[in-house]
Amino acid sequence: MIYIILNIVCVLFLIFFTHLMDAKQKTSTSSTSSLSIAMLITAIESILFVLVLIMQRTGFTALIVPIMRIAFAIDGIAFVTMTFSILDMANLKKHAVISVLKIILIVFALFIAFFKFKTIDISFENGIVIDADYLISGPARQFFPITWVSLYAGLYRYVIPLAGLLFLYLIQEDKNATQLEKYQTVVMGEGVLMMWLINLAIKFISTAAPAFSLLYMFSYLFMYVVFYMAISKISVPSGKAMFVTMFKSVVSYILPAAFVGVLSMFLQPEENIFTTVFIASFVGYSIAAVLFSLWISSVLSSSSRLYTADYEASLEKDLANVDYKESEMDQITAKMFEIMRRNVESSSMSVYILSGQNELDVAYSSNNMDIKIPLNNPMFDALLNINKSIVVKSQIVKEHDLAVVQKELEEFFRVTKSDALFILNEGHNIFGIITLGTKASGDHYKEYDYNVFVKLYSYFFVFGYYMRNISNKDVLGVVNREIKMSSQIITSIQENIDHVKTPKVDIGYMMVPAHNIGGEFIDMIRLTENRHLFVVGDLSGKGIAASMNMVILKSIIRSYLAEVHDFKQLVVKLNTFVRDSLPKGTIFAGLFALIDFETDTMYYINCGVPALMMYTQVYNNVIEIQGSGHILGFVKDLTPYVSVKTTKLNHGDIIMACTDGLIQSHSLRGEQFGKERVQQAILDNSTYPAQRMAQFTFEGLLKFMSKEMEDDVSILVIKYEGLPEEEKKEEAAPAEGEVEASTESAETPSEEPVDSQMDAVADETVTPESAAAEMAAAETETNEEAAPEAQAEPEAEAPVEEEKHAIADDDLTMPEGFEMPDLSDLDAMMKEAGL
Amino acid sequence: MYKTRKRAVIISINVLTVVCFIAACLLLLPVKKVEGYSVITLVVTFIVFFAAVFWGNRFRSYLMARVRKETLESGETVILNDFIDRLRFCYSLDDFYVVIGDILEKQGDCSVLLVDRTKNYILYNSPNRTSTSETVRNKLDQHFTESWPDGFYFFDRHIGVTTNYRKARGFFMCCDGYHLYVFCRYTRLFDLDVYKRLFEEYKRFVSRSRTITTLSEISATTKEWEQLAETQQSFLPQKIPNIPKLKIATYYRPLVNVSGDYFSILPIDSSKTLLMLGDVSGKGLPAALIMGLVMNTVKIIEDKEDLVGVLHAIDKAIKGMHLQDKYTVLFLSIVDTEKMRIRYINASMSDPIILSPSPDGYRIKPLTSNASLIGILDVGDVTVAEKRLFRGDTILMATDGVSEVMDDSGVELGDTDIYKKTLMAGAAKEPQQMVDDIVDLIWKYNGDKKLHDDVTMMIAKVGY
């Protein structure tokens, strides 16, 4: 009964593996298609054999002999098919001789099975007993005691497969087959050997237990399984790998099997084996041995410490463990090579990093390569275009995409003595490549290696990125220390500000760099007791270089103030300085505002600050009072582009200027902060002190963005307290008078006729109302009230304004009114201010 | 799910193998007929054992692959698997946001919130009610603080951590201060086993993006420093102006790329030229700043003939910086080729010299110091010194980097005869030739060692 069950199991397995083999052939390109046919034939044979066994069991013996004949004939046919399918692996051309030979062998098998086997007896006691004549009748028989049965078995089981394998091996040698193909042949040879061994073992056992010969199908099963494994091989293991595999099979199969076998051998009682003691002990050690064997094999196959041809997991683990922070570059490269050597068996590794001249230079090489690789090689472009960052040499001929650059690639691999190429690129810019030498076994990288590389590409990218940034960095330590120091230095210089002391005004400002120090600054310079110059600006460029320019510009403004006595001229000169003396391409967007506290007037030139807002307490609204100016550093002579505007400041008015960092920052959703939000912030916080206003506006921005800042932000808030209440009332009339004048002049900026030689300080007067009129948003009640008033007596007020400007001009241009301090005074003042 | 099924497979395979082996063996073992032991028994048990275990192993790996495919690689878990696969190729947070959008949001309908807990920034949030809600954010802030240990967790509908993933409203992962919250009502459908891999990959991503960021910063810093050096060098004369009767050659070699040495050649009119050479104390950015300041201050001064005024302007500019202990030594001179004289202020520079031809070779006339350090002390009264120049005179100005080069025995170059000889010999040559000779000497004298200071010099030859 057990024999029937085991044979049924065998049939199922055979069918299952035939199916697997068939599925494999559909996907793979190898021409092993007939191998599955051989397996199928074997499966049919085993089905027939099972049928026979069942017939025997049920006593239905009439058909046993004919069926067995068919089965034996099929046995031979299966071997012939199998052998010829093995030969097919060498991709031989269809040859008439081969086909004829095949047919002859098949016919011969049929002939022997049907005509030369005399009796066939199948029983559960005696196994398979076939009787046949001796091949040679006569005395020579003594020397060649060969029956038709042994001839049949010897020829089809031994000679034909062996001949097929040897033939295949020779062809492969001749055709220069790949290592993998040769290795597959070897594994198949092992399969055939295994079949022989099992057959011999069965034969040996059948001397004691003849029924064992009924299990002969199992030898075929094992053979085909090994064949299947051979075909599934994707890489050639090194000697080490083979050793490891052998070690694994010894530990997980042979040793436990031997243990169980030896124990049973000694423990088995005579005659009756079903004694309680034996069964109990047998069950006991069997369970232990089987579980151990299963456990150890699963442990060994998943252990990364032991070498495995399927190295993906252990390679990834190793790569993930590389710590770029704590090691020196030499150690990292050595470690990386060691990882590749151990897991992938790469014989060498080189890293080439982009140097200045569009060339890749050796940054690391385990085999001391010393070549430069020009990036203008068309293969790089071609590879990037097809989005291929990794190429292994064995792909070149196989992949159509690579056909266009086949020559270049082959040349490249030859020159760099490598077998695999990793391109490290950011977008379309290559910053480096990694090359790997052939495997230590001399073999090329395969599909499997390629797939693993692709999967783990990110680790190679990080490694390359590291190499790019760390190589040639001998001054790294110095630089890092200096940079840390420099932000402190720059910040302390930025804070060199003459703070305004007059109670008429409340100043608040914030300068917040986004990442590191940059080119933005706010400066206040005290000119006289009643005059203060405010500068808010942004120098182009990033980082320390921009900061350096900023520091110089700050100092130069003060130096110029010692020489230049005209507001507009100061800006014109600064433009020339930025353009000619600072590094090429430097520009400066800034606001220059001069406030005269005595006349409550602000003169300003806006050279490109994006937002200059003014809040008027009387109307409780915020308007933009963009001045007219031009970013410094573009044109040679700025004179035609700038004009000084003035605006009258009243109690409670607020001026806010900020750089584009505030206006143009985006929220997470991509929305811009925008001017409206700034205006709203001014309105909302107008009751707070200036410093708080700047702070709240900035906090509003942070909340709006709720992420890291994109750009530097500078905010200057000037809150004009003006005169005490009573005095203010007196001033009110002329102040309003100015309104009318400006509403008219708003459309056409009027050049002041005061001084033609020196530029007029105020080219245009801006008041909240004029700006509001321009904006056509003057429908508020307050504005309507102001409008008639404005129209009422325009002429009457005009002289007043002119007079005011005349005074203003005097103040600025003539040293007698307010002497323009030179720098020594400034120094003294700064000392006074406790700076 | 995956884990349970995996266990089921292992246990059933183990049991099956054991049962098969024992049954087959007992049934197959032939009766022992001899005394002692029988090799047949050994062979039979050996083969049966081998076969049983071999097939057991095969079946196990086959079934494991099936189980894996059916649980982890099918159903909703696929979404997280895709996410893991894409995560492998993320190098920066920006890449990560794209993947979140593509997989978790578009395919998985999840809403995601990524918070940098150390800075308390929201790095990313999905544009929907849950992840943008203020209350949700506050709850997350309160519940999962910075000190929350790394790992993956599930949270329930109250956004409290839960172990019952069947009732989870979502999951979150913490790694190194980066908290990734994924709100997903069908979290229970993800196979539990996927989280371990997800977290592992997330951890790798965080460390990878950190590495990349650090490296980018280093590269940016280096670039910044190079830019500073470029800016600084742009302040120096880009080419030597062509001045009649005055031939000038210069040499400038900063030790690191940023330096405190400077020189300037500014023609005032057809016969007068302002020559300046100086050295700011210290190194690095402060020195570079002062250097830039001095150069530009001098450049914009209108009356450059007033050397005392120039000196005062420089002094003021430096003092205006309020940097501690920053000063400069400097040699400031106006060479007049018409009147053949040099007016100069030497503010503590190691002596510049004039090599004057005389019947018995060249005579060395030092231009001794007549002012104190600039930028730290009160300048006080400074008088401009004046010397006559003769045709063929060579003026040599150099920072102490030249004369203080040491050989192996510690002797400074300025004290050696060979230096004087080179100067004498050089004075007869073209200025550029002389500069080259001195530079050669410096390298030879210094040996293979690294220089310790910036080296700057200027040689002007009068009358040709």
Image (spheres, coloured by chain):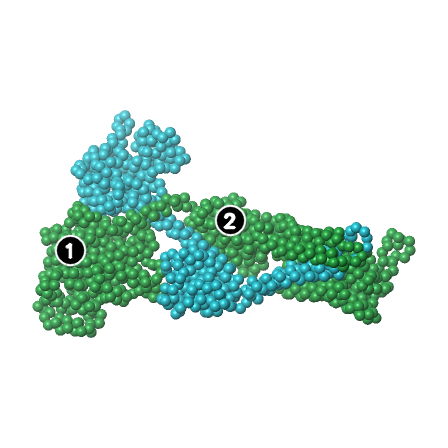
Chain colours: A green, B cyan
The picture places residue A711, in percent across and down from the top left corner, at 32, 58
The picture places residue B44, in percent across and down from the top left corner, at 75, 56
> Circle 2 sits on which residue?
A336
Give the position of the N terminus of chain A as an image quadrant. bottom right
> Circle 1 sits on which residue?
A502
Answer yes or no: are tags 2 and 1 on the same subunit.
Answer: yes
Q: Chain of mark 1?
A: A
Give the residue drawn at x 29%, y 37%.
Answer: B399
The picture places residue B402, in percent across and down from the top left corner, at 32, 35
Under tag 1, what secondary structure? Answer: loop
Under tag 2, what secondary structure? Answer: helix
Residue B412 makes an appearance in the image: yes
- Going by the picture, which residue comes out furthest to the front? A276
Quarter of the figure with residue B294: top left
**Residue A658 relative to residue B184: left or right:** left
Q: In this picture, is A575 found above or below B106?
A: above
Give the residue drawn at x 41%, y 64%.
Answer: B113
- The answer for how far apart the CA atoms under marks 2 and 1 are is 67 Å
Mark 2 neighbour density, 10 Å: few (under 14) some (14–19) many (20 or more): some
Quarter of the figure with residue A669: bottom left
Nearer the observer, A500 or A85: A500
Q: Chain of mark 2?
A: A
The picture places residue B174, in percent across and down from the top left corner, at 44, 59
Amino acid type at circle 1 is: Thr
Q: In this picture, is A773 found above or below A363?
A: below
Give the residue drawn at x 24%, y 66%.
Answer: A684
